[in-house]
Amino acid sequence: MPSLDSENRSILVTGGCGMIGSNLVARLVKDGWDVSVADDLWRGKIEYLYGDDGRPLIDLDRKFYKTDLCDANECQKIIGRTDYVVHLAARVGGIEYVFENQGDIFRINNLINSNVINAVRKAGKDRIKGFLYVGTACSFPCTRQNVPDPEPLREDELFPAYPESAYGWSKLMGQLEVGYLEKETGIPCCTLILHNAYGTPTDYGYRSQVIPALIRKAVNFPDEEYVVMGNGEQERAFIHVDDITNAMVLALEKGWGKGCIQIGPSYCTGIKEVVETIIRISGKNITPRFDTSKPEGNKARCADYRKAREVLGWEPKVSLEEGLGQCYEWIEKSIMKDGAYKDAKVT
Ligand SMILES: NC(=O)c1ccc[n+]([C@@H]2O[C@H](COP(=O)([O-])OP(=O)(O)OC[C@H]3O[C@@H](n4cnc5c(N)ncnc54)[C@H](O)[C@@H]3O)[C@@H](O)[C@H]2O)c1
């Protein structure tokens, strides 16, 4: 079983320029891993790979591959050079983007997953020491997410499958394929099923998820109207990116061969509460408009994370209030700094 003490410490993070990926890269570099990144910069940014000291976290000439993982040959070239793979690359977006682009998201995510997993399979057990995949809570059956204040979801409730969105289906297909990979090749695998992740650096434009979008609107208010999608009754289990990178680092040590493990808090927070907290942080006098003509997704979900606690020793640590404050500060600074306000106005 591989461990952090193993001699082989080279690791590839696909989607490493994204919100979760860039945080993971920083953490792995700090922990002494030899990190490389593959990303097509569809949503991630190269500047996310710079540390607080203004220097790149990795050697960008040698260790950064700007590549579209829909290209099977590219996957093959990159993946054959590393010992561990953390596969995060995917088309990810806010609910409106996801529902307007279902076919594209389904096709691209399945292509990326299948290419990456096949390249790992071809590289084989002697080369790849571990493969970490991330699934999503969006893959749980919509029938289990249609009542307010629900029982926390368990991993064994993923099947029979009935996700609401093509995004949820595509991530679930990847999870299945990882299972087959592990069975057929003996390459140690692990899947972390993440609930609603937020943190910085983050996209806050038209493809952004609920928290960055709501923060952007508060920063831009009154120039941008404060519209909330749906009636605000929807509830999610929000999880800060620092808690996610912790889970990933623990999974690289203790998760191999343990199947899928949920990462998220065991309670829900309503969108209305998130809105109120953001408005309070903004210090502005904002009256939100709830637009029920917009998609709002499943009613509610949260995680029974007992497996994460037992297998990984993981617990969420960052409070929503603290996390939202940190995000607000970052998004406000970014909007002020590079005039990103203009782009962000495309909602
Ligand atoms: N953010 C969440 O709430 C959440 C929840 C559950 C699971 N996840 C999963 O976590 C992973 C990371 O998500 P994130 O929130 O950091 O999103 P993100 O969009 O910030 O990161 C995804 C990265 O993948 C890259 N990418 C997209 N298509 C690519 C392609 N064809 N080739 C190469 N790179 C490509 C993007 O440019 C981006 O940098 C994803 O797999 C996502 O499905 C995220």
Image (cartoon, rainbow, N blue to C red):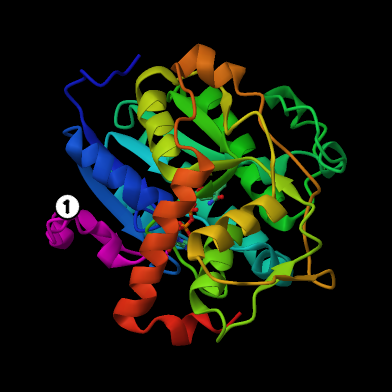
Does the magenta portion include 49? Answer: yes
Across and down, in percent, residue 151 comes to: 79, 27
Across and down, in percent, residue 129 comes to: 33, 27
Q: Which part of the image, by quadrant, shows the N terminus?
A: top left
Query: Magenta part of the protein: which range?
Result: 44-68
| Mark 1, residue position | 58
Q: Which part of the image, by quadrant, shows the C terminus?
A: bottom right
Pick the residue in front: 127 or 98: 98
Query: Residue 300, relative to residue 91: is it above or below?
Result: above
Pick the residue in front: 86 or 21: 21
Task: Check disc 1 and report its element: helix, strand or loop.
Answer: loop
Q: Quadrant of residue 251 in the image? A: top left
Judge from the rendering whether residue 309 lies leftward or rightward of residue 151; answer left or right.
left
Residue at the (78%, 31%) spot, across then down: 159
Does the magenta portion include 155? Answer: no
Query: Residue 37, relative to residue 338: is it above or below?
Result: above
Across and down, in percent, residue 7 comes to: 16, 22
Q: Quadrant of residue 246 in the image? A: top left
Say which amino acid is labelled 1.
Answer: Ile
Q: Residues within 10 Å of mark 1 (few under 14, many from 20)?
A: some
Query: Residue 260, relative to residue 173: is it above or below?
Result: above
Query: Residue 97, relative to residue 160: is it above or below?
Result: below
